[in-house]
Amino acid sequence: MIGLISATAAGAAARDRLAAAWPDRTRVYEGPVADAVRAAFASCEQLVCFLATGAVVRLVAPLLAGKAADPGVVCVDEGGRFAVSLLGGHGGGANDLAREVAGVLGAEPVVTTATDAVGLAGLDTLGLPVEGDVAAVSRALLDGEAVALRAEVAWPLPPLPVADEGAYTVRLTDRLVEPGEGEAVLRPPTLVVGVGASKGAPVEEVLALVEGALREAGLSAASLAELATVDAKAEEPGIVEAARRLGVPLVTYGAEELARIDVPHPSDAPLAAVGTPSVAEAAALVRGGELLVPKRKSERADGGPARATCAVVRRPGRGRLAVVGLGPGARDLLTPRAEAELRRTSVLVGLDQYVDQIRDLLRPGTRILESGLGAEEERARTAVEEARRGRAVALIGSGDAGVYAMASPALAEASDDIDVVGVPGVTAALAAGAVLGAPLGHDHVSISLSDLHTPWEVIERRVRAAAEADLVVTFYNPRSRGRDWQLPKALAILAGHRAPTTPVGVVRNASRPDESSRLTTLAALDPATVDMMTVVTVGNTATREVAGRMVTPRGYRWQETPERQEIQKAQEARETRETRETQEEAR
Ligand code: SAH
């Protein structure tokens, strides 16, 4: 919960805006500010104080307990211009919160933690537990000293400016190691422990078994991703509580699914009890991986029969492929989610001109694989290959990366051994629509006029269908130096079903510095004014120009206009003629 505290009317107004934006995440603390801060500090994970930093420093100073326990505190100034991360930048999440609050209030986030200020991922912000000499290694990274990465497992880490050799090391391992001087150890969640237990098995027995198995195998509990068992044991208190104390989720599988897993130590007891010859080994292995600790049983101080079993598996690190749409060009049309993906990627794959669009957002150490126009298939393959090596990869495209872009060739190559994340972007049709007015207010379609990968007959058939269905049409890839007859041809097909006065919007470089747009008509459009940086939007029979803007009514009951009636009549006449001709042919 985020506690909100304010003192003045302006502060209260900003506070209310934040509370309205995040009704489930925030709680307003009223009353004298000193009491409010104290109460919120005691019960919230984070505080946003609409007060001067000095006032907040004085109020929280006597309450500070330590980095691990204190909430994150963000201050917003009286003018609502800055959201200052004051306390708990990393551990308390105040840096991220400052950015989020700034986003809601239209303020500037102020972050002074060194690693964040220069755009480095702080070692403690990678989402992985970290041990060892974290402060020294972070300082070395910041100072640009050589820091070596020793990765014992593949894991999709965000970029770190690491070298092959160095006086400092970041070690990525799930094994129990004693971090040396100048060494920080990152713990990837690679380990799964499968657990079986008889009814009523005490939590202490389960926990001692799991912890003992990990320790004796030289594995770190900080790398434990989950406990796994059979559905029938989903509510078994000893297992549920053990997972809770270990701070990991309990995942359960059906007995049938577990029975199909090939395990080294099947037995009759679980088969009779829950319907699978193995619980611990099978539940640990069901999602694949390497069996590090075969089934073992718990030991009881009183020498009685064991009530729990466990087995440990290491799952291979899964790479991550983010397919990220950058929007039409303007920075403020790049979504915050796209920006976050770009900052967590360690390998960026894309067309050189798109890379230029976002280069400043990338963290130091990001590997950039850029290529020129035409290398689409190769880019898609590279991105997937990099992800399959366990890396965090972003494949970028302008607009939406799934619209006439890289998402499909990449996903056509991708296997199920990588995670894929899609981040939508503002596609050209929408960016152009906003420039033109409201052309997409009713059913619409996008058609690419590029016959590089699609035979012209197919394109023409679709244009014809759109014309007959009276859809608003946005043409992508409308015209290039080598392809100049396609657009006039497509417009002629539409003109067969729409009046010559039908509005047509031509938008070039939407949202880019040299954006231009024109509103014309089907009869008056000069194709020579159209190039590959342009989208052409053709209205339907109801689209009108209103005060210089292109507007397609959204109603299904359209106003009957004389023009519409005329077109309707012409269309009906043609259909009757066609029907007659077909009938005659049939005879
Ligand atoms: N994935 C992109 C489309 C790629 S196809 C998207 O979702 O927008 C390339 C075509 O998109 C160009 O030929 C042009 O027709 C159109 N286009 C892309 N960005 C544009 C922009 N900013 N302004 C106008 N047209 C654009």
Image (spheres, rainbow, N blue to C red):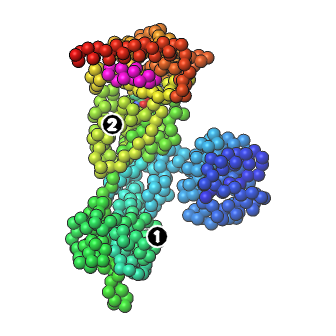
User: For this view, does 419 lie left or right of residue 96?
Assistant: left
- Residue pictured at 46% horizontal, 72% vertical: 245
Residue type, label 2: Ser
Q: Nearer the viewer, mark 1 or mark 2?
A: 2
| The C terminus sits in image quarter | top left
What residue range appears in magenta? Answer: 460-472
Which residue is tagged 1?
A: 244
Residue 281 lies within the magenta run: no
Q: Position of residue 304 (x, y in %)?
A: 34, 89
| Count of numbered labels shown in the rendering | 2
Q: Of the numbered discs in the image, which one, if any, rests on residue 131?
A: none
Q: Position of residue 38 (x, y in %)?
A: 71, 63
Q: Where is residue 280 in the image (x, y as percent from the top left)?
A: 31, 71
- Residue pictured at 75% horizontal, 44% vertical: 10
Residue type, label 1: Arg
Q: Where is residue 90 in the image (x, y as percent from the top left)?
A: 54, 55
Residue 414 vertical position relative to residue 193 in the rendered view, above or below: above
- Residue pictured at 47% horizontal, 40% vertical: 338
Q: What element carries label 1?
A: helix
Circle 2 packing at 10 Å, graded few (<14), some (14-19), many (20+), is some
Q: Does the residue labelled 1 lie within 8 Å of ligand 1?
A: no
Which residue is tagged 2?
A: 408
User: For this view, does 35 lie left or right of residue 479?
Assistant: right
| The N terminus sits in image quarter | bottom right
